[in-house]
Image (tube, helix red, strand yellow):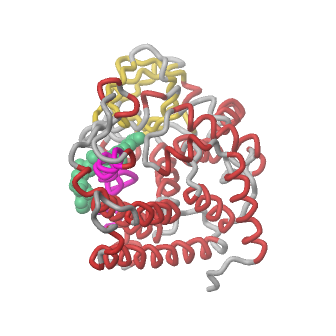
Amino acid sequence: MDLRFTPEELAFRDEVRTFFHENLPESIRTKLVEGKKLAKDDIVTWQRILNKKGWAVANWPVEWGGTGWTPVQQYIFQEELQLTPAPQPLGFGVTMVGPVMIAFGSETQKKHFLPRIANLEDWWCQGFSEPGSGSDLASLRTAAKRDGDHYIVNGQKTWTTLAQHADWIFCLVRTDPQAKKQEGISFLLIDMKTPGITVRPIITIEGGHEVNEVFFDDVNVPVENLVGQENKGWDYAKYLLGRERTGIARVGLSKERIRRIKELAALERDGERPLIEDERFREKLAAVEVELKALEMTQLRVVAAERHRTDNRPDPASSILKIKGSEIQQATTELLMEVVGPYALPYQPEREDDDRWNEPPIGPEWAGPIAPTYFNWRKTTIYGGTNEIQKNIVAKAILGL
Ligand SMILES: Cc1cc2nc3c(=O)[nH]c(=O)nc-3n(C[C@H](O)[C@H](O)[C@H](O)COP(=O)(O)OP(=O)(O)OC[C@H]3O[C@@H](n4cnc5c(N)ncnc54)[C@H](O)[C@@H]3O)c2cc1C
């Protein structure tokens, strides 16, 4: 298996790289380099720039605005986004509900929603998990009862990422409580402005507001917002979750973090020699870089194998990418904590967005986001299917246990 890029692929990489460098607003790039949070506007602005170029929904079929790129080109595009670094197009629309609509939605749904997803006119969020139904997702209880040409939805979703910005939510709901649990679930599109929906923030360990609880109280949803067939939602969710795992290795993002670690570790610290001169630190950094190289090779093997796949099902090896990729992402945040040293202690969440934190930072300006990032990135081994669940998949689908 040849894991090297062809001359055409290298030329494509240069084209993508040049476009990103010439068109990404510097203020957005700086926020990402420094580990600061992006505002909704930053994400919308960049996705619209990509959409104008025809690259916002690169993974979709050409008839719906996709690029027709090969899996290798898709991979290069993702890697360059992460290396720049630039924001990803909003995944809830572009890699989740969009592909589900394309595969299973009605013509009306496709014509209305797909162009709006591409241009980020509608911000989507994902309403799958519920209290008690995360890994065991099929046990979900949010109910949708048919009443004429509407469903009446009652229940609760949780961990709903960025629901505070959302115009729409795609939900798994129980439409047949008598059926076997996987067979009584439907996939419903719900307008977040519908009366009866309440969004409550969950403040995470670093003090940020990224996830929410969403409550549904007699929410009326028109029947035409059902995707595909009633009680077939589990099949559509499996299709979606398989796509969520690919790209989760985020090799480019970890490479960019390592670049940043080296840059910051080379700085003098209060008259002490730079940390990069410490042999023990360099050993730890090298160990993470070796792991990352191995992950990159695995990622390239999966991408190369995708050239020959015809079944449109995710490669179970994507679970390995999720496990290793998330562990390495966490390891880079641990190295950054070593770099920042004692300045990690007075951590000041959301200092830049919030008047209460307008005092000058303690320590250098760059130190501020490092501890919040470290805490926030504990999530990577949980979302998108926990690492324990991915290990179960590897055991069954790859090792045959
Ligand atoms: C930051 C963040 C953002 C998220 N965003 C969204 C979102 O936008 N939309 C959405 O729908 N969901 C979202 N989630 C939810 C996420 O998908 C769930 O948290 C995840 O699936 C785990 O479910 P749970 O939290 O209920 O934990 P549980 O399933 O209760 O798991 C608890 C622990 O038990 C372990 N465990 C459970 N079952 C097994 C098993 N069979 N074998 C071995 N170990 C097991 C788990 O690995 C975990 O360590 C998000 C989560 C986080 C942390």
Left or right placement of residue 389 versus residue 96 in this view = left
The residue shown at (75%, 54%) is 67
Left or right placement of residue 325 versus residue 346 in this view = right
- Displayed quadrant of residue 140: top left
**Placement of 293 over or under 50, stated as above or below:** below
Q: Is residue 176 magenta?
A: no
Q: What percent of the width, then of the height, locates residue 376?
A: 32, 47
Q: Quadrant of the N terminus?
A: bottom right
The residue shown at (29%, 33%) is 202
Q: What percent of the width, then of the height, locates residue 106?
A: 66, 36
User: Which is more toward the observer, 278 or 43?
Assistant: 278
The residue shown at (70%, 40%) is 49
User: Which is more toward the observer, 5 or 172?
Assistant: 5
Q: Quadrant of the C terminus?
A: bottom left
Q: What percent of the width, then of the height, locates residue 266?
A: 40, 66
Say whether residue 136 is visible. Answer: no
Residue at the limit of the structure toward the top, as seen here: 195
**Placement of 117 over or under 58, stated as above or below:** above
**Placement of 81 over or under 153, stated as above or below:** below
Q: What percent of the width, then of the height, locates residue 185?
A: 42, 40
Q: Which residues are magenta?
A: 367-392
User: Which is more toward the observer, 345 or 109?
Assistant: 345
Say whether residue 40 is visible. Answer: yes
